Structures are given as structure tokens and as C-alpha cells.
Amino acid sequence: MEQNRMYKLISKLYKIPRSITGDGFRDSLDIIDEAIGGGRAI
């Protein structure tokens, strides 16, 4: 992954408040899943 894309991904993830069972955690997983090409099943 190029540096600019990685920086944008981290910037997007950093501002999400999260706990291990909360909505922020699931939002983070969705963003990461999208960044790596999808495929996460719930």
C-alpha cells in the first residue's frame, strides 16, 4: 500500500472512538475490510 493511502487510512481510523464490543470497533473493521478488498462476513 502506498504511503499516502496508508496515511489516509490511519487518519480515518484514528478519530473513531472504539471499545472491543462497541460500534466504533465494528466501524473500524468495516474500514479496514474495505481497504484490503472486502470479504469480511458477519
Image (cartoon, helix red, strand yellow):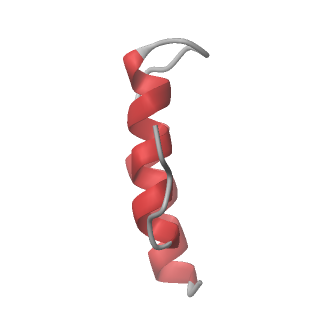
31 relative position to 36: left or right: left
Q: Residue furthest bottom?
A: 2
21 relative position to 11: left or right: right
Q: Count how many numbered circles sit on residues in the image.
A: 0
* Residue plotted at (46% across, 73% down): 37
Q: Residue 17 at what x, y percent from top left?
A: 43, 21
Q: Residue furthest front?
A: 41
* Residue plotted at (47% across, 80% down): 4
Residue 30 drawn above or below residue 34: above
Q: Is the N terminus in the top left, top right, bottom left or bottom right quadrant?
A: bottom right
Residue 35 drawn above or below residue 16: below
Q: Residue 16 at what x, y percent from top left?
A: 40, 30
Q: Residue 32 at what x, y percent from top left?
A: 50, 55
* Residue plotted at (41% across, 46% down): 30
* Residue plotted at (40% across, 62% down): 34
Q: Is residue 33 visible?
A: yes
Q: Is residue 15 visible?
A: no
Residue 10 drawn above or below residue 16: below
Q: Residue 10 at what x, y percent from top left?
A: 51, 55
